[in-house]
Amino acid sequence: MKLVNKLFSLENRTVVVGGGAGQIGFSLCKILVDAGAHVLIADIDGEMAAQKVAALEDEASRERIHVYPIDVSNKSEVHRFFQQASASHGLLYGLINCFHFKGNTRKLDTASNFFAPFEDYPEEAWDMVHEVNLKGSFLMSQAAIPYFQDNGCGVIVNISSTYGNVSANKHIYGDSGINSPVAYGTSKAALINFTRYLATHLADQNIRANCLSPGGVFNNQSEEFITNYSKLTPLGRMAKADDYQGAILFLMSDASTYMTGANLVVDGGWTAW
Ligand SMILES: NC(=O)c1ccc[n+]([C@@H]2O[C@H](COP(=O)([O-])OP(=O)(O)OC[C@H]3O[C@@H](n4cnc5c(N)ncnc54)[C@H](O)[C@@H]3O)[C@@H](O)[C@H]2O)c1
């Protein structure tokens, strides 16, 4: 096998993708399977995950993705999931925490109190966002550790955001009703340091942990928003979900064996100026 193929291969490795039914999450699932992995989607919207898997043209890919409907913020559901996953699929190699609470799993819903302005941001929305984004990542990572220990190794990737690194720019949203809420930014920033904690505490168990900070993905936002976002992005456009496939393959594979505790920013240059 050519060195380059060996370096990026995930042949026979089983990777859990929390939030794998989502726009970015499912795109990551597709490249992981393409690299040879078995993928276990752990997502509260099991129906959306199952529909996306069923729509894949390649039968071999369909057979290598398995869907587990769970709420990542519920400790007993998380533990039950890992027990079932290991009983059905054997040794576990990787975990990607790629979920977030946005009020509605399928669309940007401006009626959701998730999008409330800072001055009126409801306590319940603050709690819910941290419950899923931060506590969910904590519970999933903690529960995965005994299974990684059984395997003698493990790789964790937490998905943060541009807005975990810098503040949201409130001027780009116009009157779309969509903004980037305070709780989103605080939970995403916390994930970057949570990753460092995992990396330093688990390195001696041969478990690596890194963060990926994506920029905004095109998702039928208003023309005004897309134009404003693109102007502030050196590469001049919003991302496609598939723009993160290369980065995740690097972080999950042996191509990054000497990397832990890092935050890989893939944002079209948004944070560079
Ligand atoms: N899309 C973007 O523009 C963008 C930009 C930067 C960072 N991100 C980050 O990338 C990740 C994926 O984003 P996306 O755009 O694919 O989002 P998405 O909304 O399309 O997908 C999120 C997924 O998380 C799942 N989920 C929500 N709550 C859950 C829970 N309690 N338990 C289990 N699953 C739950 C949803 O069902 C959904 O499938 C998120 O962490 C997000 O913060 C996204």
Image (spheres, rainbow, N blue to C red):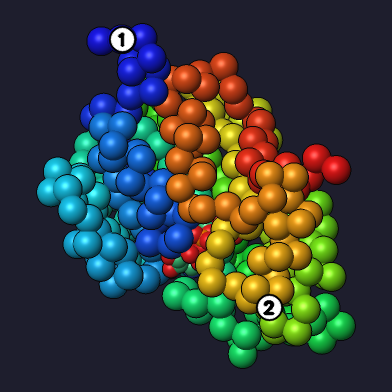
Residue 135, x across and y down, in percent: 59, 59
Residue 41, x across and y down, in percent: 33, 54
In the image, what residue occupies the spot 79% across and 62% down?
A: 168
Q: Judging from the image, what secondary structure is the residue with disc 1 in? A: loop
Which is more toward the observer, 105 or 92? 105
Relative to 198, is 24 above or below?
Answer: below
**Disc 1 residue: CB within 8 Å of ligand 1:** no
| Tag 2 residue | 178
Relative to 36, is 177 above or below?
Answer: below
Could you tell me how far apart the alpha carbons at marks 1 and 2 are, in whole angstroms? 47 Å
Mark 1 near mark 2, Cβ–Cβ under 8 Å?
Answer: no
Q: Quadrant of the C terminus?
A: top right
Residue 249, x across and y down, in percent: 44, 33
| Tag 1 residue | 2
State the mark number for residue 154.
Answer: none
In the image, what residue occupies the spot 83% across and 70% down?
A: 170
Q: Quadrant of residue 173?
A: bottom right
Relative to 56, is 89 above or below?
Answer: above
